[in-house]
Image (cartoon, grey):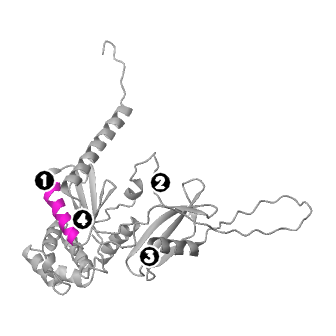
């Protein structure tokens, strides 16, 4: 599992900001006019340096602070902060800032009228990604993964060895590409090849998925294409079409769209799983994952029973009980 070492911007923060006041010269009463909105004392430059000092963010990372926007929290404004190395590695964190610009805090707001995972669920899209399992499964598991990541390899083994066997009709698995290009030189090319295989035969993707994770120690940026075509040939795939797809990077946009979705979800390490929207970070042991899946299945069952009981209509039948 790879992370930025300056991540996890947690906790509450207090900031002091000065406001200037001007004395107005006495004047005769005038016709009342609408008051101008009070200007916030929030200072983006100060906030940026405050965060850099607090979380020991190195100078080579940029801290970009957006303008405050209206928030669902009364008396607070939303401020989005992006920390980036100028390349693909970016982390976004949201803060709440008081309207007078003197206080800030980080936290997650839950709408008790909706699922606690609703915000993430709305961003989780299959969008043509590889899927294993029934479409109408009660539980959906999205896994953001990187073919060159050792922890992803271990999690992939866990998922593939247990999901279909234990939950043949209740769980579907959605694979999402999130290659960490800065540290894994062949991760993105491998993701492109995987999508090329899927494009030719959707069912064949999972065989490639299992094979490339198993071959991870032997794969290099130089031999990736050759080994992949050899594998595809052994599986009776059209290696000519596959080679053209690889050379033309015909599926690169699919991989980039998946990675962009990960960033929107503020995924910052691989593997990261979402079980019906519930975020699980890192290499999750099967016992732990099974417990979460069982909980989600039971929760869905109770929700369905509650919905059916709510809508049940009993007709008065003479002589009936």
Q: Earlier in the sequence, mark 3 or mark 2?
A: 3
Position of the N terminus, as image quadrant, is bottom left
Count neighbours of disc 2 (C-alpha within 10 A) and say few if under 14, some if 14 to 19, many if 20 or more: few
Residue furthest out toward the top: 319
33 with respect to 257 (left or right): right
Q: Nearer the viewer, residue 169 or 266?
A: 266
Q: Which residue is mark 1?
A: 165
Image position of 205 (left or right of 295): left
Q: Position of residue 185 (x, y in %)?
A: 26, 82
Residue 153 place in picture, x, y as percent: 19, 69
In the image, residue 18 sits, relative to residue 112, either above or below, namely below
Give the alpha-carbon distance from disc 3 to disc 1, as whole Å: 45 Å
Q: What are the residue bounds of the magenta stretch?
A: 150-165
Could you tell me how far apart the alpha carbons at marks 4 and 2 are, in whole angstroms? 32 Å
Mark 3 or mark 4, which is nearer the start of the sequence? 3
Residue under label 2: 109
261 lies above or below 289: below
The residue wearing badge 3 is: 57
Q: Nearer the viewer, mark 1 or mark 4?
A: 1
Q: Residues within 10 Å of mark 1 (few under 14, many from 20)?
A: few
Disc 4 target residue? 130
């Amino acid at each position: 599992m790879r992370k930025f070492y300056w991540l996890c911007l947690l906790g509450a923060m207090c900031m002091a900001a000065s406001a200037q006041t001007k004395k107005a010269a006495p004047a005769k009463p005038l016709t009342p006019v609408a008051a101008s909105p009070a200007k916030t004392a929030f200072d983006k430059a100060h906030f940026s340096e405050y965060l850099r000092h607090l979380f020991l963010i190195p100078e080579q990372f940029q801290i970009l602070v957006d303008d405050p926007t209206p928030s669902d929290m009364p008396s607070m404004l939303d401020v989005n902060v992006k920390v980036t190395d100028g390349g693909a590695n970016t982390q976004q964190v949201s803060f709440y800032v008081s309207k007078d610009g003197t206080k800030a805090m980080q936290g997650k707001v839950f709408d008790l009228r909706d699922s606690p995972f609703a915000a993430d669920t709305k961003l989780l899209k299959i969008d043509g990604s590889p899927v294993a399992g029934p479409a109408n499964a009660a539980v959906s598991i999205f896994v953001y993964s990187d073919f060159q990541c050792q922890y992803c390899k271990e999690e992939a083994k866990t998922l593939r060895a247990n999901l279909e066997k234990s939950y043949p009709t209740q769980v579907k698995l959605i694979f999402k590409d999130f290659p960490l290009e800065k540290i894994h030189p062949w991760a993105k090319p491998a993701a492109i090849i995987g999508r090329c295989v899927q494009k030719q035969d959707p069912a064949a993707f999972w065989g490639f998925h299992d094979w490339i994770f198993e071959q991870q120690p032997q794969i290099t940026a130089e031999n990736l294409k050759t080994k992949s075509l050899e594998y595809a040939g052994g599986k009776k795939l059209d290696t000519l079409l596959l080679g053209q797809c690889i050379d033309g990077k015909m599926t690169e946009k699919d991989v980039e769209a998946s990675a962009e979705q990960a960033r929107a979800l503020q995924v910052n390490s691989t593997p990261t799983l979402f079980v019906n929207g519930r975020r699980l970070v890192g290499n999750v042991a099967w016992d732990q994952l099974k417990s979460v899946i069982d909980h989600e299945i039971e929760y869905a069952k109770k929700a369905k029973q509650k919905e059916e009981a709510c809508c049940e209509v009993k007709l008065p039948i003479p002589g009936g009980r």
